[in-house]
Image (cartoon, rainbow, N blue to C red):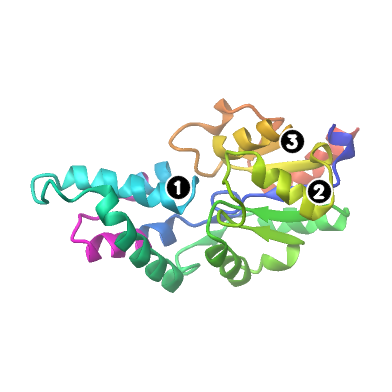
């Protein structure tokens, strides 16, 4: 299968860009607006990756539990979700990219893949209105033929639909497309779509070692991907 790879679908947060700082700042401003206690960076790292709705609901549930003695029983996640989402969008767009960094090796890896004629798409569960400005700010946008966010399709990863739709947009078959991500979320979507998947070892995998997740390879840097792909092709 790897000998026929013509395209790669690359995740964003935790794969190309370390965005924990952006999440932490935006979420803590949001918690302050709601009179809830601040969150920790470790909690953000365990929670990101499944889309903004999941992130906000998970953070609200955790923080409401922490503040149980000071908030009323009528204050629930459902009550707070909409105002939290509105404030989070405002704060995230204000700080998007300011507290994040491109991982070492990402630029080199993407450039080498493009030089080999591999078509590239970015597929993230991050809202598209967050993803596109971040790619622009970090100098990554020009590598990608297509960019899709968590709100681009009816369902998000780990559902296979986003991968299938991205392959359609790239005009490639699933079997000739490689998914590149950092978590079990990416791997589950790829497996369900029958798409080969490579995982990087430095990202966010919900607090678990990513090597526990089945993949065709685990790489310490995206810079290693082109050479690994050449070797896999024989």
Q: Earlier in the sequence, mark 3 or mark 1?
A: 1
The residue under label 2 is 7
In magenta segment, residue 40: yes
Image quarter (top left, top right, bottom left or bottom right) of the N terminus: top right
The quadrant the C terminus occupies is top right
Q: Nearer the viewer, mark 3 or mark 1?
A: 3
Residue 202 visible? The answer is yes
Which residue in the protein does label 1 denote?
48
Query: SS at mark 1?
Result: loop
Residue depicted at x 76% and y 41%: 178
Residue 115 vertical position relative to residue 141 in the rendered view, above or below: above
Task: Tell which circle, 2 or 3, labels the residue nearer the N-terminal end.
Answer: 2
Do residues under tags 1 and 2 come within 8 Å of each other at their CB atoms? no
**Mark pair 3, 1: CA separation:** 23 Å
Residue at (18%, 44%) from the top-left corner? 66
Tell me if residue 105 can be seen.
Answer: no
Name the residue that disc number 3 marks: 195
Write down the quadrant of residue 108 in the picture.
bottom right
The reply to whether the C-beta atoms of the residues labelled 2 and 3 are less than 8 Å apart is no
- Residue 144 locus on image (x, y percent): 74, 61
Helix, strand or loop at label 3? It is loop
User: Pointer 2: residues within 10 angstroms few (<14), some, or many (20+)?
Assistant: many
State the separation of the CA atoms marked 1 and 2. 26 Å
Q: In the rendering, at what x and y percent does residue 176 appear?
A: 84, 40
Say which residue appears at 27% left-offset and 44% top-offset.
61
């Amino acid at each position: 299968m790897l000998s026929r790879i013509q395209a790669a679908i690359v995740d964003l947060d935790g794969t190309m860009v370390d965005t924990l700082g952006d999440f932490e700042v935006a979420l803590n401003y949001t918690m302050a607006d709601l009179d809830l206690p601040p969150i920790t960076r470790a909690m953000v790292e365990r929670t990101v990756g499944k889309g903004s709705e999941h992130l906000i609901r998970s953070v609200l549930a955790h923080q409401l539990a922490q503040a149980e003695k000071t908030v009323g029983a009528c204050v629930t996640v459902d009550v707070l979700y909409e105002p939290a989402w509105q404030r989070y969008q405002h704060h995230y767009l204000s700080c998007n990219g300011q507290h994040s960094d491109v991982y070492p090796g990402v630029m080199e890896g993407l450039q080498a893949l493009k030089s080999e004629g591999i078509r590239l798409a970015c597929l993230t569960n991050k809202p598209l209105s967050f993803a596109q400005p971040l790619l622009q700010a970090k100098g990554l946008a020009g590598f990608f033929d297509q960019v899709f966010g968590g709100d681009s399709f009816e369902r998000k990863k780990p559902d296979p639909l986003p991968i299938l739709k991205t392959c359609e947009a790239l005009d490639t078959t699933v079997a000739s497309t490689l998914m590149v991500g950092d978590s079990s979320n990416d791997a589950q979507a790829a497996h369900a779509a029958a798409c080969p998947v490579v995982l990087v070892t430095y990202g966010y995998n919900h607090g678990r070692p990513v090597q526990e997740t089945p993949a065709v390879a685990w790489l310490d840097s995206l810079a290693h991907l082109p050479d690994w792909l050449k070797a896999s092709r024989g």
